[in-house]
């Protein structure tokens, strides 16, 4: 799917670090091309649920911090921001981490 060469246990550890720091819950990996702002072919794209208090700066910080931890570009798509076809399809496409 998205990143077969990623060590999943290490990725889960990094995600737990981000979830402890920012008010969001990572639901899983999305297929490449799901987040329009990820241009790195080795980038990772995640679907997340926002928790109370999440703002745009938190979301950007979470992307930067997770990118630093995994060593590649990261995009986070919020489930609450999905509309239309994407709102129906993206949750079904998520690959658990």
Image (cartoon, rainbow, N blue to C red):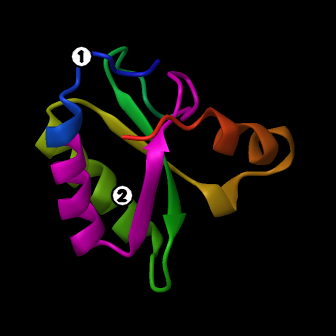
Q: Residue at x 34, y 26 (%)?
A: 43
Secondary element type, mark 2: helix
**Residue 31 vertical position relative to residue 27 in the rendered view, above or below:** above
| Circle 1 residue | 5
Q: Reply yes or no: does residue 27 show up in magenta.
A: yes
Q: Residue at x 28, y 61 (%)?
A: 61
**Residue 60 left/right relative to 21:** right
Distance between mark 2 and mark 1 Cα atoms? 25 Å
Q: Which x, y percent locates residue 26? A: 42, 56
Q: Residue at x 44, y 40 (%)?
A: 96
Q: Which x, y percent locates residue 82? A: 72, 52
Tell us which disc is closer to us: 2 or 1.
Answer: 1
Secondary element type, mark 1: loop
**Residue 21 vertical position relative to residue 48 in the rendered view, above or below:** below
Q: Reply yes or no: does residue 84 show up in magenta.
A: no
**Residue 80 left/right relative to 63:** right
In the figure, residue 33 lies in which quadrant?
Answer: top right
Q: Which x, y percent locates residue 7? A: 18, 28
In the figure, residue 54 lies in which quadrant?
Answer: bottom left
**Residue 37 vertical position relative to residue 69 in the rendered view, above or below:** above
Within 10 Å of the Cα at label 2, are there few (<14), some (14-19), or many (20+) other Cα atoms?
Answer: few
Q: Which x, y percent locates residue 45? A: 44, 35
Within 10 Å of the Cα at label 1, are there few (<14), some (14-19), or many (20+) other Cα atoms?
Answer: few
In the figure, residue 40 lies in which quadrant?
Answer: top left
| Circle 2 residue | 60
Please give the range of residues in magenta.
11-36
Q: Residue furthest bottom?
A: 53
Mark 2 or mark 1, earlier in chain:
1
């Amino acid at each position: 799917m998205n990143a077969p060469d990623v060590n999943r246990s290490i990725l889960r550890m990094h995600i737990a670090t981000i979830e402890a720091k920012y008010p969001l819950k990572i639901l899983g990996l999305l297929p490449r091309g799901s987040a329009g702002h990820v241009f790195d072919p080795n980038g990772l794209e995640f679907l997340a649920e926002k928790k109370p208090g999440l703002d745009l700066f938190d979301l950007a910080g979470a992307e930067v911090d997770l990118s630093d931890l995994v060593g590649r570009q990261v995009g986070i798509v919020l489930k609450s921001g999905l509309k239309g076809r994407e709102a129906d399809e993206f949750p079904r496409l998520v690959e658990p981490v």
